[in-house]
Amino acid sequence: MLETKAVFAIITGILLVFVGLYSGRSKGTVLIISGTFVRKKVNMKYFIIFFFFWIFAICVTDSNDLSNYRYAYNSRISHDKEPLFDIVRFFFHDQGWSFDDFKLIWVTLVLILLYIAIKKYSETPSAVAALALITPLTGFITQMRSALAGAIVLNAFSLILTGKKKDRVWYCIIIILSAQIHITAYAFLIFLLIKPKENRTFRTLYYVIIAVITLIALLFSTFYMQTIYNVFNALPISGNNAVRVLSYFQGEGVHFRYAFFLLCKHLFLFFLTNKACEIQIKEGHYENTEIPRYRMICEANKLMLLFLPITIISASFERLFNCFILIQYVVVFNVGNSKVLLFKRISWKKSLQSLMIIGILFFTSIELYFSSDDMVRILNSIQWPF
């Protein structure tokens, strides 16, 4: 049952989403996907949305993830494989800071990085931020380690877009460092495989392989736990490492319906992003230097499909998509007129944004059905913690 303060937070969020989606073109934008940004004026709508995001993040005091973080913080329990997270957490703990004090600093850093990244890439940052308020909202608030690692990866992605070898080395270094906060960041080393030129034969073969593996994973989702235990019992893996890996697959409640939902959601976002990149490349609205970057984003979008099978098997790996979803929002909203068009003109160029909004609302409503208990717990925990 939602409490009054939770209903107030929902209403405020809905109003801010409408403000962000209908705010139009951000004045002062100079360069979009270039990895640099210059603004002549502050976008107040964008700032207000993120300010609400920050207040909400601070006031959420409980969830399944936050409960585990709070216990680990107060008990000074090490995460072992993520030493940078442990070093920072132990420092604040030993200085006598409460978990809420530590969380305040942490979520502030996460949201600052998100604020910079969206502003860096997007022509309409308020619209992208508005969709971020819908999803992946709680992923950047309650999943503390993966949230910061993802925000760092999101900013580092601009280094891949330059196409320079030196920047790729820096990207690799940043990813390795962010993996010391959350180990899943290593997965984004896959972006080092991005090449601006594409081989059509390889692309077809790639799609076929991904489709086959994903289909197997979808069927596998109905009985995956027993099979995983059997595999691990047959492998020469130490007990501690086996328990750590298995923990990502336990208690997820992933079954065929939810696995199928995740598949549809990410294929929908993949399709819209791919189409938006094609429009930008063909029509060349931006400088010639921007076209290769859209090609690279298109390739990154295709590489993200590699994470689909493992996400279908275990919803814990859904966090791998959290930061890239913001890139997908950016690309779609950078197409054509930046104002949201609700079917005023029926064409790919003019309807992509409408499809994105409707699709996100549809998939979010289904996702709330699968995770309603934790969402109610999050909303009812809203309070000023200091």
Image (spheres, grey):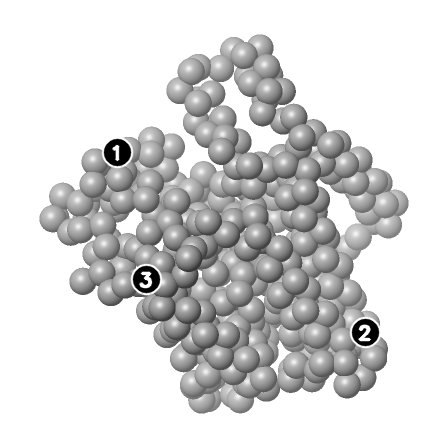
Taking the view exactly as shown, the residue that stands out farthest to the right is 201
Which label was assigned to residue 366? none
Q: Is residue 79 above or below residue 149?
A: above
Task: Give residue 253's quadrant in the image.
Answer: top right
Mark before the other along the chain sequence, 1 or 2: 1
Q: Position of residue 340 (x, y in %)?
A: 66, 81
Mark before the other along the chain sequence, 3 or 1: 1
Q: Position of residue 151 (x, y in %)?
A: 45, 57
Q: Is residue 184 above or below residue 56?
A: above
- Residue 347 is left or right of residue 257, and the answer is right
Which label was assigned to residue 382? 3
Q: CA distance from mark 2 to mark 3?
A: 41 Å
> Given the image, on which type of amino acid does mark 2 rest?
Trp
Q: Which mark is nearer the camera, 3 or 1?
A: 3
Q: Look at the numbered disc 2 and give the secondary structure of its residue.
A: helix
Taking the view exactly as shown, the residue that stands out farthest to the left is 96
Mark before the other along the chain sequence, 2 or 3: 2
Which label was assigned to residue 348? 2
- Residue 254 is left or right of residue 211, and the answer is left
> Given the image, on which type of amino acid does mark 3 rest?
Ile
Residue on which the image places disc 1: 77
Residue shown at the point (64%, 84%) measured from the top left: 339
